[in-house]
Amino acid sequence: MTKLPTTLTLVLVVQLGLAAALYWAGTSEVKEEEPLLAALERVDKLLISDADQKTTLSRSNDEWTIEQLDNLPADAARITEALDRVGDVSLGFPVTTTSSAHERFEVADDDHQRHLEIYADNDTLGSVFLGSSPGFRQLHLRRDGEDEVYAVEMNVYDYPSDPEQWLDKQLLAIDAITQIEGEDYTLQLKDEKWTLSSGEDVNIETVEDLVSAIGGLRINGTGEPLSGEELKEVEVIVTRDGEPVMFKFQSAGADYRVSRSDLGSVFSLSQYEFGRIAELGLADIRVDKVSEASGEGDYGSSVLDKLMPDLQSEETDFPQVPLAPADG
């Protein structure tokens, strides 16, 4: 009678041992991570879309443009950063392998936060859906045509579908300037020195700020021309390499616009950027001889400075004036 329980106990121990061995063998397997995409240096087209918008970025001769904005220049540095982040992604174990979970992780074909398509020479290098976030700077990702969903280190906000977000905000900036013509002045660079065509002396600091403002001009995005009773317009012609380019600035209330003669678009800009260029005139640029002679409003200090040596060189005894007795 004791032999049967012993045999059953032995069988149970063997079964438990086999189950444990199989379990540890399965969990000890390490899935080798694979890169999400390769050969990103060949990329010449990038499509980013969601349910509302789409951006098409294309590269030609190392210059990126935006199809939806009449092929205006794109921010090449931002595109490079976005592609580098994709290149750094490696896929480990999936969080799910069932298609029924795609909507829950927002990576379904018809329900996703972003659809990212990457091309090189008309060949598709990759097509992925970006979805919900399981943690800080993480998101769920699914490759098009596959069921597996992965949690990867990416941020969906680094891939906006709005074309304006990819616009090169300094596309109007001009450097190596040799001449600037405003409403009432003409500045010329001669022998590395800025001069007024009228022969008047210039305020070097103001002129350098103006040149810097044109060389670093930043826009906010595209816009429509302004109109109305409050409309004010200023034209500034800038010459570089012998080629003149005309900037047209507009203001109306709290709105500001700028366009450039070699581009067919109008752009919005801040009041600060507008004022640095459009609000400068001859009175700001030239040296005011009257103010310069009078010490630019620091007359009192100038007079005291001239008098101080005389006062310090003489020991002057001032008469003592008796104080009147206080009443009461």
Image (cartoon, helix red, strand yellow):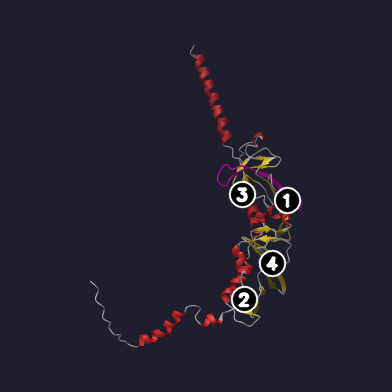
Q: Residue tagged by mark 2?
A: 282
| Residue 41 picture quarter | bottom right
The percent coordinates of residue 123 (x first, y second) are: 75, 49
- Label 3: how many Cα within 10 Å (few below 14, some 14–19, many 20+): few
Circle 1 — which element? strand
Marks 3/1: CA–CA distance:
21 Å
Q: Residue tagged by mark 1?
A: 119
Q: Mark 3 or mark 4, which has the lower sequence index?
A: 3
Circle 2 — which element? helix
Q: Which residues, given as a range, are shown in magenta?
A: 117-140
Q: Disc 3 marks which amino acid?
A: Tyr
Q: Name the one closer to the observer, 247 or 326.
A: 326
Marks 1/2: CA–CA distance:
52 Å
- Residue at the spot x=70%, y=45% of the render? 127
Q: Mark 4 or mark 1, which has the lower sequence index?
A: 1
Q: Disc 2 marks which amino acid?
A: Leu
Q: Residue tagged by mark 3?
A: 157
The percent coordinates of residue 206 (x first, y second) are: 58, 74
* Residue 47 in the figure: left or right of residue 135: right
> 57 above or below 241?
above
Circle 4 — which element? strand
Q: Residue tagged by mark 4?
A: 248
Q: Name the one closer to the observer, 203 or 22.
A: 203
| Labelled pair 1, 2 in contact (Cβ < 8 Å) | no
- Label 1: how many Cα within 10 Å (few below 14, some 14–19, many 20+): some
The percent coordinates of residue 287 (x first, y second) are: 57, 79
| Labelled pair 2, 3 in contact (Cβ < 8 Å) | no
> 111 above or below 41?
above
Q: Mark 1 or mark 2, which has the lower sequence index?
A: 1
